[in-house]
Image (tube, helix red, strand yellow):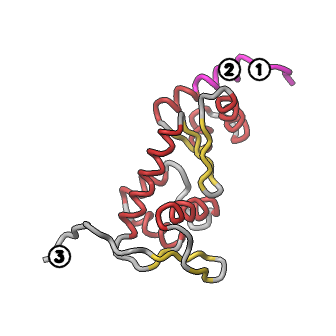
Amino acid sequence: MPRGVTRTILSRTEEMHRLLLSEGCVAVEKARRALGVSRMQARYVLSRLHAEGRAVPVAVGRAALWCRDGEAAALILGELADEARRLLCGLRFATPSRLLKLISRDEKASRTFSEYIPLSPKAAAAVSFLNAILQLILGQPAMHSGATPVYLVPPCRGVKFKSWR
């Protein structure tokens, strides 16, 4: 077991930094696939970048996004919030699992969200991630149905719908 930082770790760190500069933000899974390493090795490389001040971790629910800076993190969270708002328009109530179903049915939203979370209804991290997004755009839940938070969706303003005629 090496005691210091090896050349392999340094090259992975530089490769990850280039990925962050080009993508803005990445999930650990995307970093793992890009480097071809295990999840723990990807987290280690990302934490090294954070220690060096070249990456910022952003916790969203139980998922973590790693961004090149705070501006990139705000941009990505804003993009995700806008997509969620678009999908929720016209609903009265929303839950994280309902939002997940809406995302799965919408091609644009599916592409956007699948970069950061698995779109499986059984993935607890996805439900937790979407709960954090709902809290970001709608505030605290209006009530809880068992353990499921239920959010009140305000009416959409300034949104024009296409006529079906």
Residue that appears at 46% across and 31% down: 22
Residue that appears at 73% across and 40% down: 40
Q: Position of residue 20 (x, y in %)?
A: 53, 32
Query: Can you tell which quarter of the image residue 132 is in?
Result: bottom right
Residue type beneath disc 2: Leu
Q: Are marks 2 and 1 in contact (CB under 8 Å)?
A: yes
Q: Does 1 appear above or below 106?
A: above
- In this rendered view, identify the residue nearer to me: 108 or 47: 47
Give how far apart the Cα atoms at labels 1 and 3 are. 62 Å
- In this rendered view, identify the residue nearer to me: 76 or 101: 76
Horizontal placement of 56 versus 100: left or right?
A: right
Residue that appears at 55% across and 54% down: 117
Mark 3 surroundings within 10 Å by alpha-carbon count, few (fewer than 14), some (14 through 19), many (20 or more): few
Residue type beneath disc 3: Trp
Q: Which mark is residue 164?
A: 3
Report the quarter where the C terminus lies: bottom left
Describe the element under mark 2 as helix, strand or loop: helix
Residue type beneath disc 1: Val
Q: Position of residue 98 (x, y in %)?
A: 49, 73
Q: Which residues are magenta?
A: 1-15
Q: Which mark is residue 84?
A: none
Q: Position of residue 53 (x, y in %)?
A: 63, 28
Residue that appears at 48% across and 39% down: 72
